[in-house]
Image (cartoon, helix red, strand yellow):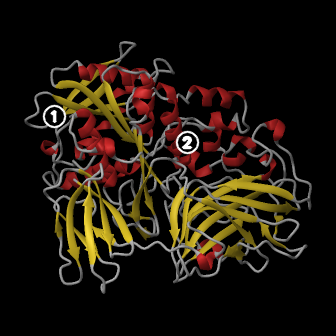
Amino acid sequence: MRYNCAILFQVKMLLLLLALLFYSQHSFAILTPVVDSIPLKDGKKMAIDIYKPVGITKGPVILVQTPYNRQLYRFGLPLGIGNNLNSSNFIFVVADWRGFYGSKKAAYLGSPTMGDDGYAAVEWIAAQTWSNGKVGTWGPSALGRVQYQTAAKNPPHLTCICPLVAAPQYEYEEYFPNGDLRTEYVQQLDQLGFGLTKTLMAHPYYDNTWSFVEAANNYPDSIRVPCFMIGGWYDHTIEFMLPYFNQIRNSTATAVKSKHKILVGPWVHGGHGTAQVGSNVQGELNYPNSAGWNDSLAMQYFDFYLRGQNNGWDANAFVTYYQMGENKWQNSPTWPLTTTANIEFYLHKDGSMDNVKPTDSGDSLSYNYNPLDPSPTVGGSTLRNDLDQGPYNQVAKVESRNDILIFSTTTLSKNVELKGSVSIHLKVSSDKLDTDFDVRLTDVYPDGRSMLMLDKCMRMRFRNGNTLALTAMMVPGKVYDCELVLPATCLTFLAGHKIRLDISSSNYPRFNRNMNTGGTMYPGNSLDSLVNPVTAKNSIYVNSVYASSMTMPLVGYSSGIQNTTATSTFLLYPNPTSAFINIDLPDQKLDYTMNIYNAIGELVYTKAMNTQNNVPIAIAHLGAGVYEVRLSDGVKVLTQNFVKQ
């Protein structure tokens, strides 16, 4: 069910390039692969393109398996190689999935599986004269999921896998989070030809079918090769990737469990637009020093396992993540982090939010939700190609409406460092039998922008659980618990900003519109139909008896916002880099000692720094890998990581 479209934008690029090539035959360099095919288990064949750099007669291979047309890679290979094939130390094999594009004639209905096809591809590659027998896999989204399926079949010559923005599970919550259909997501998958609507409409409640599907596609103990997962805080798969990372670290064989690692950047899922995994611009925000880490670390990973390079990969942290706000890469041996404390923020009738529980006994706030005029989706972890992805300002199109409640902290005097999953605990009621509650967590900038970070929904008939037996209608006017857990993130709300929680009853078309009738949710098995919808009056309770709150896992937070521990940092660029780094000192009045350490903690460079000698630092002599810069003024030590390519 999860066939995401992380490279859908390439389809558009192909059409554009073909149109341009029509007018200028010599405007673009196009790679010319060797075209071949791989015999599969049932005797049919999988179409492939083989890219062999000049000078490599026998070498390691990276396999890419795609449903989005292998020929797109003729316009440029991944991992930063582009058209410069001969700069690569790897041979690439790009295969069309069975039933797609060049492999369309090999279409089948379920058996052999895609994992079987991946097994056949790996072993065929290993048997070729130009292969040294070591095969790794790479690819985002659907191209990532097939890597797990391939690894689960344990082909003998599969050496390592590198799935991006992908997890292998098929889960009810992916399609019906808290019972509410992800409308635009399924629409996009249907547009790509995966045709999930009929199946999903037949199973809108958690049932035996879902139980079977989830069990059949959750196989962490079958992943017996190193796995390097790459995800993004704005990607919709992150809430499935992080748990699965823990599963493979706990469940795989002892010899391999310590070899799994994950990288999480400030990235969207991708598929269209300019924001992609590995770009620094995401939505309406810019994350310096985030661009290219995915490719640089993936190449270090492949060099280590496929080429046997002693480049320090094995010393890298199990978890490398980007702390947004501070715009800093950080490391951890585990996820979730063990350094956080859960801090409660209570909602108040005046729209404020703080650590003090309300004292009045009767306060509540209400708004009207009209399904014919829903609160619109503006950014977030969307997929449909006509919607924006990532952080976008909610003020003009969401917070200016009258069908929303807005709760904000006072302006922060210190940084507030969030690491993990935020939980929302609402006390709610409605004058209708069923309705939705949607929340958006935003970072409010000093200029007033309210930038979306995370969102979640709850269809109230599912408040007790997702099976049909557990669903129940609301009694109008009765107060209920509404519990929502947001996907994990790492974000520092900076001093001068505010933390904000928006509450409405729609986020459309990201989630299906509740008709508020208590009747059939998807009449006519339509993803987006409205039959006699009614307007609901919905209430949030903010008093001493029914207190609504938000729990945030924070680092260094004491009794209140005014006492929060600040985290200083400095800017280091370019990052990744190959020749030099620049450092912007945090305080130009002070003298600093700058030390650079490699991945195993060895000091490899030191320099005294101040405003007079703050010049670019040459690092071309250092080997490829991750390094830590420690900047000390004699009192405090500030750190930043960088990638040497």
Residue 428: image location, x then y, percent: 82, 62
Q: Nearer the viewer, residue 34 or 456?
A: 456
The earlier-in-sequence mark between 1 and 2 is 1
Q: Which mark is residue 243?
A: 2
Q: In this rendering, does residue 93 appear at all?
A: no
The answer to whether 319 appears left or right of 555 in the picture is: left
- Above or below residue 369? Residue 231 is above
Residue 336, position as x, y percentages in the image:
55, 50
Residue at the extreme bottom = 589
Residue drawn at (44%, 42%) of the image:
141
Residue 511 appears in which quarter of the rendering? bottom right
Image side of residue 183 versus residue 124, left or right: right
Q: Which residue is mark 1?
A: 52
Mark 2 secondary-structure assignment? helix
Q: Is residue 7 visible?
A: yes
Q: CA distance from mark 1 to mark 2?
A: 37 Å
- Answer few, some or many: residues within 10 Å of disc 2's Cα (few below 14, many 20 plus, some between 14 and 19): few
Q: On screen, 299 above or below 62?
A: below
* Residue name at image x 36 percent, y 61 percent: 290
Nearer to me, 304 or 502: 304
Q: Position of residue 494 (x, y in %)?
A: 51, 75
Q: Quadrant of residue 631?
A: bottom left
Left or right side of 284 for 622: left
Q: Residue furthest front?
A: 634
Residue 284 appears in which quarter of the rendering?
bottom left
Q: Amino acid at mark 2?
A: Pro
Which tag is nearer the camera, tag 1 or tag 2? Answer: 2
Q: Name the residue at 65% across, 77% down.
A: 409
Residue 345 against residue 61 in the figure, above or below:
below
Amino acid type assigned to the residue bearing label 1 in the image: Lys
Q: Residues within 10 Å of mark 1 (few under 14, many from 20)?
A: many
